[in-house]
Image: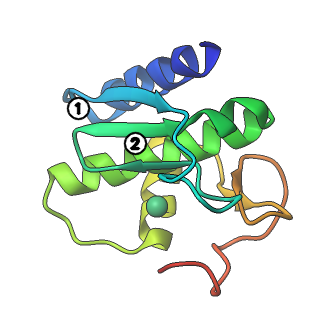
């Protein structure tokens, strides 16, 4: 699955930038109960990133921004840094050097959209 190649490349980029390994496992799930809403596409626990296969069908700009956001969460979790969703976006932007916007479906994207993260989304 090409999305896993994208995730792998982003993780390697992040590890190179932050200077230590994240030891992340990435899996793709087709479970619709894990990802009930349209914008439910990924989550992480610090060690593993679970991507919905729904993400594969979105533009690469969404895939990159969603995965970058999750890698940021993982780094912050591993460092025991409590953080908000907006802080996860900011940390991702610091690591990757691109902005994270929210598109018409409130999904992260590297191209155009709302910024910062809309206030009606989970904090
Ligand atoms: Zn998040």
- Above or below, comparing residue 25 to residue 43 in the picture: above
- Nearest the camera: 17 or 56? 56
CB atoms at circles 2 and 1 under 8 Å apart? yes
- Above or below, comparing residue 81 to residue 23 in the picture: below
Q: How is the image coloured?
A: rainbow
- Nearest the camera: 102 or 51? 51
Left or right of 116 in this view: 45: left
Measure the alpha-carbon separation of dots 2 and 1.
9 Å
Left or right of 72 in this view: 96: right
Give percent across and percent down for residue 81.
19, 65
Neighbour tally class for label 2: few under 14, some 14-19, many 20 plus, Cα within 10 Å: many
Give percent across and percent down for residue 77.
22, 56
- Above or below, comparing residue 64 to residue 104 in the picture: above
Please name the residue shown 81% across and 48% down the image.
Answer: 111
- Above or below, comparing residue 90 to residue 33 in the picture: below
Give percent across and percent down for residue 61.
75, 38
- Nearest the camera: 58 or 100? 58
Mark with earlier residue (2, 1): 1
Please name the residue shown 27% across and 47% down the image.
Answer: 75
Neighbour tally class for label 1: few under 14, some 14-19, many 20 plus, Cα within 10 Å: some
Q: At numbered mark 1, what does the secondary structure look like: helix, strand or loop?
A: loop
| Residue identifier under label 2 | 71
| Residue 113 occupies quadrant | bottom right
Q: How many marks?
A: 2
Please name the residue shown 51% across and 60% down the image.
Answer: 89
Q: Quadrant of the N terminus?
A: top right
Mark 1 C-beta closer than 8 Å to ligand 1: no
Label number found at residue 22? 1
- Nearest the camera: 61 or 94? 61
């Amino acid at each position: 699955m090409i999305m896993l190649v994208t995730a792998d490349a982003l993780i390697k980029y992040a590890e190179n930038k932050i200077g230590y390994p994240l030891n992340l496992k990435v899996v793709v799930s087709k479970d619709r109960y894990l990802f009930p809403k349209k914008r439910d596409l990924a989550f992480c626990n610090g060690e593993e990133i679970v991507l919905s296969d729904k993400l594969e069908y979105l533009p690469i700009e969404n895939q990159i921004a969603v995965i970058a956001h999750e890698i940021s969460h993982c780094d912050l979790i591993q460092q025991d840094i409590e953080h908000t969703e907006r802080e996860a976006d900011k940390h991702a932007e610091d690591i990757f050097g691109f902005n994270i916007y929210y598109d018409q479906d409130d999904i992260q994207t590297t191209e155009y959209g709302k910024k910062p993260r809309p206030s009606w989304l989970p904090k």
